[in-house]
Image (cartoon, rainbow, N blue to C red):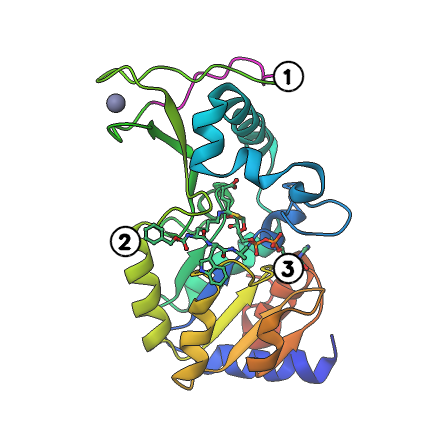
Amino acid sequence: MTAEALAEAGRLLAAATRPVVFTGAGMSAESGVPTFRDARTGLWQRYDPSRLATPAAFHADPALVWGWYEGRRHGVRRAEPNPGHRAVAAIQARLPGTVVITQNVDDLHERGGVPGAVRLHGSLFAPRCSACAHPAPVPDDAPPPEGPLDPPACVRCAAPVRPGVVWFGEALPEEALGAAAEAASRCDLLLTVGTSALVHPAAEIPLVAARLGAPVVQVNPEPTPLDAVCAVNLRGRAGDVLPALVRVAWPADAGD
Ligand code: BJW
Ligand code: ZN
């Protein structure tokens, strides 16, 4: 990341009144939550998404899928927000028109000081019935499962409870997708952080902003398909780049 690129991104952020911050798994990587597609540490290097992250997978082996998600939920509970999450909260505090849209299923934006992130892919903390969609309580924190674990039964209809996330082949929550598209279409800056931008329709959100003329600033150590539409590319880690960006945008706030 060059000083010029950081300065230009800082100028764009300081001039914005209704920015969108669009985040993916890289946002939480420095908190110790694994990404999906990173070459060494991504979940999909070790696990087959077709056996774990589709409705058919849950139907075929609910205990395998439920145990895997419960293991991940325990991992997230042990994780803490990183300086990148806190920098996003600082942006929202400075610019109350900021909309945070996340693909992440962890709760680290909330715990990092952003209460109302728009969730495109659901949450590890919102299980529901697989048949009637009745919300189910998050299980008591027994020790994390070592492997497969039978899901609890719905209190209303007795069908197995499922993780409250969006699997491949499932529609995104209509209200969240609508809110995200609306925010992207009226924003005056889109800051995309830590996403490979390979999963649709979420990956279209930054493209909507770019198409309507908003500058797109990307924070990512690796190239992505969004490079082509970015006004500024900040190559680096969210936990380093975002606090630096906040300092450059509002130098007078340093030390607050
Ligand atoms: C750092 C960093 C650091 C690392 N700092 N950065 C159009 C074209 C092609 C395919 C499709 C299409 N439209 C739909 C599809 C099919 C499919 C899809 O997109 N497939 C592609 C993968 C090919 N999409 C769907 O199935 C979606 N549903 C759908 O379209 O429904 C249609 C429908 C309509 C009506 C009725 C019925 C159906 C649903 C997609 C759901 C995705 N779900 C997952 C799993 C969630 C649950 C779980 O957690 O297990 O969501 S998949 C996974 O990918 C997860 C993520 O949210 C999502 C995005 O990943 P993300 O966040 O970008 O992570 P990575 O790992 O890919 O990237 C990390 C990035 O961070 C990298 O770039 C690193 O460099 C970077 N990084 N360290 C900053 N420190
Ligand atoms: Zn039910």
Task: Tell me the element at label 2.
Answer: helix
CB at disc 3 and ligand 1 closer than 8 Å: yes
Q: Quadrant of residue 79?
A: top right
* N-terminal-most mark, 2 or 3: 2
Q: On the rendered image, what quadrant is the C terminus found in? A: bottom right
Numbered label attached to residue 146: 1
**Residue at (60%, 62%) from the top-left corner?**
255
Task: Identify which residue, 132 or 216, lies in the foreground.
Answer: 132
Residue furthest right as drawn: 40
Query: In the image shown, does 50 or 20 lie closer to the viewer?
Result: 50
User: Toward which corner of the image does residue 100 lie, by quadrant?
Assistant: bottom left
The response on whether ligand 1 sits within 8 Å of label 2 is no
The residue labelled by disc 3 is 238
Instruction: Look at the image and give the residue range highlighted in magenta.
Output: 137-145
Image spot of residue 93 (x, y percent): 42, 62
Q: Is 179 placed left or right of 234 in the picture?
A: left
What percent of the width, then of the height, locates residue 25? 58, 51
As measured in the structure, the alpha-carbon distance from the residue carrying label 2 to the one carrying label 3 is 28 Å
Three-letter amino acid code at the position of disc 3: Ala
Q: Does residue 76 sit above or below 158 in this rendering?
A: below
Mark 2 vs mark 1, CA separation in Å? 35 Å
Taking depth in this image into account, of 16 and 74 the one nearest to the observer is 74
Residue at left offset 31%, top offset 54%: 176
The answer, for residue 241, to whether it is visible in the render is yes
Residue 72 location in percent, x, y? 57, 31
